[in-house]
Amino acid sequence: MVTVPVPIRETRDASYTIVVGTGLLADLPHAVRTAAPALRYAVITDSTVAPLYGKRVVDALRAAALSADLFSFPAGEPHKTRDTWAGLSDQMLAAGVGRDAVVIALGGGVVGDVAGFAAATYLRGVPYVQVPTTLLAMIDASVGGKTGVDVPAGKNLIGAFHQPRLVLADLDVLASLPREQLAAGMAEAVKHGVIADADYFQALESTHAAVLRREPAALERTVARSVQIKAAIVVADERESGRRAILNFGHTVAHALEVTAHYTVLHGEAVAVGMVCEARLAESLGLAPKETAARIAALLERCGLPKGTPNTASVDALIDAMQRDKKARAGAVRFALPKAIGAMHGDDAQGWTVAAPEAAVRAILAGR
C-alpha cells in the first residue's frame, strides 16, 4: 500500500490523502469513518459500476453500522450533464440526505466529476470521498478537486473546485476493467511522464506491457508515481492560476475531439491524439526537439492508443471547439506545450501556456 499526502494550503481544511493498494474496498468503512465521518453516506455511481461494486460498498458500510444509500445514473460521458447533476440532487433531497452527509464517488472519471460537483453544490456543499474504479480515474481524474459537467458548448464548462477528503484506489477493481479502458488510463500516465518526469516516461516505455497485463506491482508503481506527480502540482497551484496548467498538455485538442465526436471517443484516447498533435505543435514552433512527438506517439501506440485525428473531425469544427474551451484567453487558443520529455515550456513569470498561431494549429490538425 502507498499513501500520498495532498497538503492543500490555499483552501482551509482541504488537505487529504491518496491511498493506493489492493483489498482497500474491504477497509472502506473504517477509512471513511476516519477521514470523512458522517451520519449518512450517499454512494453515487453509474449503471456499469453499480452492479459490480455498488451493492458491495453499501452493504459493507451498513455492516459497519454506517447509514448508506446508493444513487446511480446511466454510464458514459454523454450523461455527464446538468440534467444528471440535477437528477442526483433531486434524488438525494427526496431521500432526506442532509448536510451531515458525505458523498462517496464510486466509479470512473465521469462519476468522480458528476458526484464531486453534486457534493460541491448540494446544500451549498458537503464533503466527498473518491473511490475510483478505472485506471484513468486512479491516475488522474480523482486527484485535484476539479468537478463538473459537460454542456453543448464544450467539456467541463460548468463545475467547481472541491477537494475530496480521501482518495481510495483499490487496484483489485481493475480486474473488471475492459482492456480499452485500461489503455485509456495509460494516456494520462504517459502525460505525467512528459510534463514532469523523464525517468518515469522511460520506465513506462519498458513497463507499459506489464501494466496492461494488470501485474499488481507494475500497476501499483504506475498509479503511485502518477498521483505523486499530480499531487505535487496541485499542492503548488490548487486553482490553476499558474503551473497547474501543464496538466492540460494534450487536453486542448482532446476536449475538441470529444466535443466534435459527441463523446463517442474515450477521454484517454482523445488525450493520446491530443498529446501527439500538441507535441508536433511544440516542434513546429521551435519549442521542442524534433524527436519529441515521435517518441510520445511510439509509446502511445504500444499501449494500444491512437495517435492521429479521426477522419470524422474537420479542422474547422476542431478550431471552433477550441475557441470555446475554458482554456482560451482573449479569443486565443492556448496550449501547454513540452520543451522536452519531462519538462514543459514556460515559467511562473511568463506563464505556462502558449497562444499558438491559428495557421500552425490548422497545419498540425490537417496532418501537415
Image (tube, helix red, strand yellow):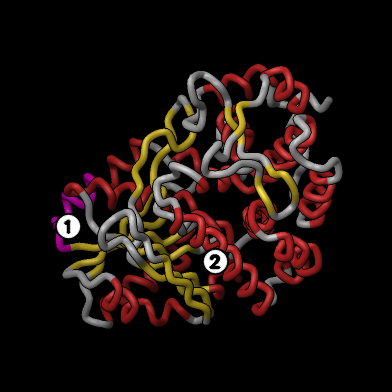
Does 275 sit above or below residue 44? Answer: above
Disc 1/disc 2 C-alpha distance (Å) = 34 Å
Label 2, secondary structure: give it.
helix
**Residue 366 placement (x, y as % from top left):** 78, 23
Q: Is residue 155 in view from this perspective?
A: yes
**Residue 196 placement (x, y as % from top left):** 64, 56
Magenta stretch, residue numbers? 89-100
Q: Nearer the viewer, mark 1 or mark 2?
A: 2
The quadrant of the picture occupied by the C terminus is top right
Q: Are marks 1 and 2 in contact (CB under 8 Å)?
A: no
**Residue, x 54% and y 22% (percent of image)?**
323
Give the quarter of the image for residue 208. bottom right
Labelled disc at residue 97: 1
Q: 52 or 103, which is in the foreground?
A: 103
**Residue 102 placement (x, y as % from top left):** 25, 63
Q: Mark 2 — residue?
A: 228
Tag 1: amino acid: Val
**Residue, x 20% and y 67% (percent of image)?**
40
Tag 2: amino acid: Gln
- Dot 1 or dot 2: first in sequence order is 1
Q: 355 or 128, which is in the foreground?
A: 355
Q: 261 or 59, which is in the foreground?
A: 261
